[in-house]
Amino acid sequence: MHLLVVAAIAAEAAHVPDDVEVLLTGVGKSLAAVAVTRAVCEHPHRADLVVVNIGTAGALRPDVTGLHEIGAVLNHDLSAEPIRRLGLDPRERLELDPGRPTTLASGDLFVTDPAVRDRLAEQAHLVDMEGYAIALACQELGVPVHLVKMVSDNADETAHDWSAAVDGCARELAAWLADFAG
């Protein structure tokens, strides 16, 4: 197995050991999709590549805290129902591991509005801005992918305090990664 760790920004991967390959995508689904697709297609170890996306996420429900391995990911800012009515499959939900109960909603919206959070909480536990795109790119390219997220905020006005929480989250994610790779 050759491990490729993917994070949106350097702060989320700050405690990943130097000998582990890290790809920084930038923030948002488009940047993540392009960066991961390019990295996988150009990777010299593609045949045994495993992608692990680590990062922070907002909790959509009050009882969701800590670190989560994602079982399903939802593209939350896609008009899926109108697309479905046209007879097309919008593929807005990707199943990653049915044994893991946590669903992640991904979108290009930085969620700080409690009304948006509550609407998303009807379908998911966590919210981020890259997970869906990373999972889709890997599924399309036939590469195993794991999404691991650490709760950094409550996807409300406290989300603006994300920068104060990111280092502690990065430490927890690196500890999980050491166990996974070890």
Image (spheres, rainbow, N blue to C red):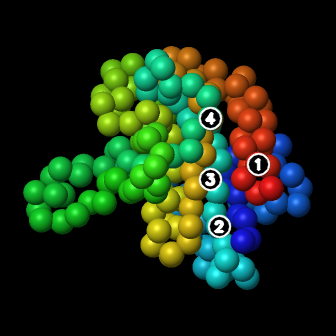
Q: Residue at x 32, y 36 (%)?
A: 123
> Which secondary structure lies at badge 1?
helix
Report the residue marked by disc 4: 67
Three-letter code for the amino acid on which mark 4 is drawn: Leu
> Which secondary structure lies at badge 3?
strand
The CA span between labels 1 and 2 is 15 Å
Report the residue marked by disc 1: 179
- Which of the 4 image quadrants contains residue 122? top left
Q: Residue at x 86, y 52 (%)?
A: 17
Indicate which disc, 2 or 4, sits on the residue closer to the N terminus: 2
Give the x, y percent position of residue 67: 62, 35
Relative depth, front residue between 132 and 146: 146
Indicate which disc, 1 or 2, sits on the residue closer to the N terminus: 2
Three-letter code for the amino acid on which mark 1 is drawn: Asp
Indicate which disc, 1 or 3, sits on the residue closer to the N terminus: 3
Give the x, y percent position of residue 69: 56, 44
Report the residue marked by disc 3: 53
The CA span between labels 2 and 3 is 10 Å
In front: label 2 or label 3: 2
Three-letter code for the amino acid on which mark 3 is drawn: Asn
Q: Residue at x 74, y 71 (%)?
A: 2
In front: label 1 or label 3: 1
